[in-house]
Amino acid sequence: MLGGIPLLGAVVVALAPPARDLLVKRVALLFSLATLVVAIAMSANYDTDKAGYQFVQDYSWIKQFGAHWAVGVDGIALVLIDLVAILVPVVILASWHDATPTDDGDGPTRHGGLRLGPRSVRGFFALMLAMETLLIGVFGATDVLLFYVFFEAMLVPMFFLIGSYGGPGRSYASIKFLLYSLFGGLAMLASVIGLYVESVQQFGHGTFQLQALQQLELSHTLQNWLFLGFFLAFAIKAPMWPFHTWLPDAGAEGPIGGSVMLVGVLDKVGTFGFIRYCIPLFPDASKTFAPYIIAFAIVGILYGGLVAIVQKDLKRLVSYTSIAHFGFIVMGVFAFTSQGGSGAVLYMVNHGLSTGALFLVVGFLIARRGSRNIPDYGGMAKPAPLLAGVFLFAGLSSLALPGMSTFVSEFLVLVGTFTRYPAAAVVAVTGIVLAALYILVMFQRTMHGPVSAGLEAVKDLSVREVFVIAPLMALILFLGFYPKPVTDVITPSVQATYDHAGRHDPPPVVHTAGNRDGAAAQTDAGASSSGDAK
Amino acid sequence: MNALVHVAAALPAREGDIKAPSIEYSSLSPFLIIFGVALAGVLVEAFVPRRVRRGVQIGLAAAGLIAALVAVIVLHNHREIVAVGAVAVDGPALFLEGSILLLALGAVLLLAERSGDATGGALVAEPAALPGTPQAGELLLSRETVTAVYPLLVFAVGGMMLFAASNTLLVMFVALEILSLPLYLMAGMARRKRLLSQEAAMKYFLLGAFASAFFIYGVAMIYGYAGSVDLGKIHDAVGSSTHNDTYLYLGMAMLAIGLLFKVGAVPFHSWQPDVYEGAPTPVTAFMMTCTKVASFGALLRVLYVAFGDTRWDWRPFMWAIAILTMVVGGVLAITQSDVKRMLAYSTIAHAGFILVGVTASNRDGLAGAMFYVLTYGFATIGAFAIVGLVRSGGSEATHLSQWAGLGKRAPFLAGCFAFFLLAFTGIPLTSGFIAKFAVFSAAISGHAVGLVVIGVIVSAVTGFFYARVVVLMFFTEPAPDGPTVALPSFFAAAALGLGIAVTLVLGVIPSSVLDLAHDAAQFVR
């Protein structure tokens, strides 16, 4: 269905004659915009009153294994597919000059100060569109084997994006990325096979259909082991501390467009997997492991924040902030409250927008200076006030300033966690302080102070760059003030997931002071979560 | 005196009573075609003038393989034991015969390719010429090339088909020799690096002879135990359990050594890297694919048909062998710096993955193993088509460092090679993933969870060295004096296209072939 458009686009772009670079870019942009239009149309037709899967397709694919081409979206998948559809045209526009062999204006051909040889333009855009296809597939699949196929196949275009178009350390970063993800994926494969064999024994015929597999009666030990297989894959993909070490390398060495896709969407597959696969398939095991997972998430929040503060490399810094943000998302998912869960899904969307914006602005900076080092910058606000303003906006959205969409989701996650694990929420709040620190320090070092040598004549944002960043800013602001359209879609699905897993919101307790504060604050956020305060 | 009476009694009373064995010629037609074509090839070698001989041989071999393939397809519903119990015509036999024929066709294409080497292709002009002599130097530059390789290949194919289909251990031994002897010769026919090639042939011959000796000694033991070399009768003897089990276990162990040597399982693997490195690249591809199919066929037949009831005795050993094979192959491949040696070690690891399916000892395991050898074979043929085209100063540039930046020099071929490497890794949307899934799921339903966990870890390890090659090809700047990449002629292009198409199609829509394998996965006894 939807994934067909970028797939076709990828094929067309890959087969384009080598010399027609401009045409290739336009065609790629066109295909990504067409995908966006279809995604919007699909969202408009999505019925928010129904909790189940919609736009369902189901055909037999490999009948020996009982595998199906089964796709469909619930609210969670829909918003993430929309996120993909929004980010890809933005990234394509932002990468307009990234793969160009020669510098023809405002485009960067240098990453981290190292000049790279000529790169294939069509290769870059074809990989990007292939990536989009696989991402839409991964979010849309309702058959576990199909999901696995997309999940693993996704590695290949990303591997080539980092390795072919990245910075000086790209070989190392790409292979690290591939090996971490491959290992996690294979652990999941073992669990997928385990589920399949169990389904053969219990139903008499093997199946991978998510809804059928949820009916399996698994022994406690088996459930724990299978859960760990899935969990490992998603924790590496997300990435959660302590499986995160590939992300700073991949995020820093990848091309800007690749990094946006990597951190903005690809990593969401991990957190999406928690809520789509881990919890519904293994509810008891999820319950068993939730406290430990939340502990890991908190370590990630604090660790990511602290390490981000001391980073000298802009892209590494943004990557570490993401590790902290993923901690929040995971915490929200495993708090098992409807606010926490909805907040986490909303966080995934917002994080894609805000970190995407932040990476893009960092890309604009690097395009001007040719360096990722923070000390190479300084006083950029003077020659390029618009750029500085945009940078500040993206930074503030990353630290979840009220009024920005990220605030809503971070708040929901904290409230949702607090009702079940008050201590965890309290500790996690310090992560917000760290966020203020790393963002503002970075802003101050790059934008304020004396203008560093070589930056006096820096150009401000070009029209293309404004077009790149403006849609993201608009969305961040809009969802900050009026998140209802998104939360309306998300909440019933999250609710259904938790209900199935047998986790309900804890009954309200009024005798603690902390909870009263939380409840009072929630009415402030009122409009955002009207549907989930059950 | 007494003895004489006995003999007289045992002799038939009258001459007319000897019944001629009935031979089902139509059921044996694939073998008859192949051996007939091989003999015709020998005549061609003797009588057809040198000028046109190469073309005639190629055409004859290809036509023979295709004709035999057609015969196999015609027979596809037969399930019987023919030629007085000597040969089985059943699902696994036909499926594997078809696989061998298809893969051999790919190998013929690779042998016929000569654009890689400016002079005469991958094969020597005169195998008997002493390396280093002026004569050898002249021959190296001539357009001449040995054409006897085609009948040899067809003989080997006949032996392989018989190996996978033989229903008695003696026929199996004969088949083992028919397939091995031509391979020993073919391994020594490389045009360049003659000494390395001859060393490979010698090593293969000595170790192969050793393994054959083990095999025939095992046959003797089993005969002592069961009183027959017929696989079905051995099965009955195992079931009746009034015999001395010592002979059974000794015989099984020795048979297994002979078969595992051909399969290339650890600890009987040590010949592979040297032989695969030294042999001409097309011959390496032929050995790695067809021999593997045939020997897994024989191993499966012996284990399932004759010793199916003692599976609780042999499974622990096969588990150990499978684990060793995967781990040793996977780990040693990391340290290799030569493409052919790396692929040799990786083929050992893959033998381990297939053994995971074999040890499942159920129908799914059998089907999975058959599917695996087929898909692995096609990816290997394709990969070797590319290895033969990357050249430096006339000979193949097999050192990995020479492959740096190949993605810039020949993006299409490097992309194809990367695709095959992804298939070897088992990335979805390639046949490698489906094959791995099939054997692993069979093993889990056969309660071999530990084996699958190790298999999964080794898969990640193999991912490392395959990815390293991709990094070298695509993400590294090409060296200024790097290798040249020959433009493939029709033959190599066809082999490559076949490899790519099968790997992709069986990765995306594998249903029909999986079905075929599953339907075929039933031995007759």
Image: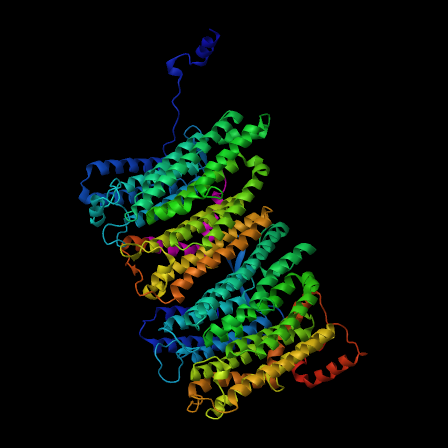
Q: What is the chief secondary structure element of the magenta stretch?
A: helix
Q: Is residue B443 above or below residue B305?
A: below
The colour mode here is rainbow
Q: Is residue B506 magenta?
A: yes
User: Can I make out residue B480 in this image?
Assistant: yes
Residue B33: percent from the left, percent from the top?
32, 37
Note whether A66 is above or below B151 in the view shown: below
Asked whether A142 or B214 is in front, the reply is: B214
- The residue nearer to you, when weighing B449 against B97, is B449
| Relative image position of residue B405 (x, y in whole percent) | 36, 65
Q: Quadrant of residue A427?
A: bottom right
Please name the residue shown 46% across and 64% down the image. Answer: A156
Q: Looking at the picture, how far across and down is residue A299, in whole percent?
A: 65, 71
Q: Nearer the viewer, residue A76 or A431?
A: A431
Residues drawn in magenta? B495-523
**Which residue does the image show at 51% across and 67% down from the upper left?**
A137
Q: In screen coordinates, is B244 left or right of B428?
A: right
- Which residue occupies the extreme right position in the image? A511
Can I make out residue A55 in this image?
no
Splitting the image into 4 quarters, where does residue A165 fall? bottom left
Q: Is A249 located above or below residue B358 in the figure?
A: below
Quarter of the view holding residue A45: bottom right
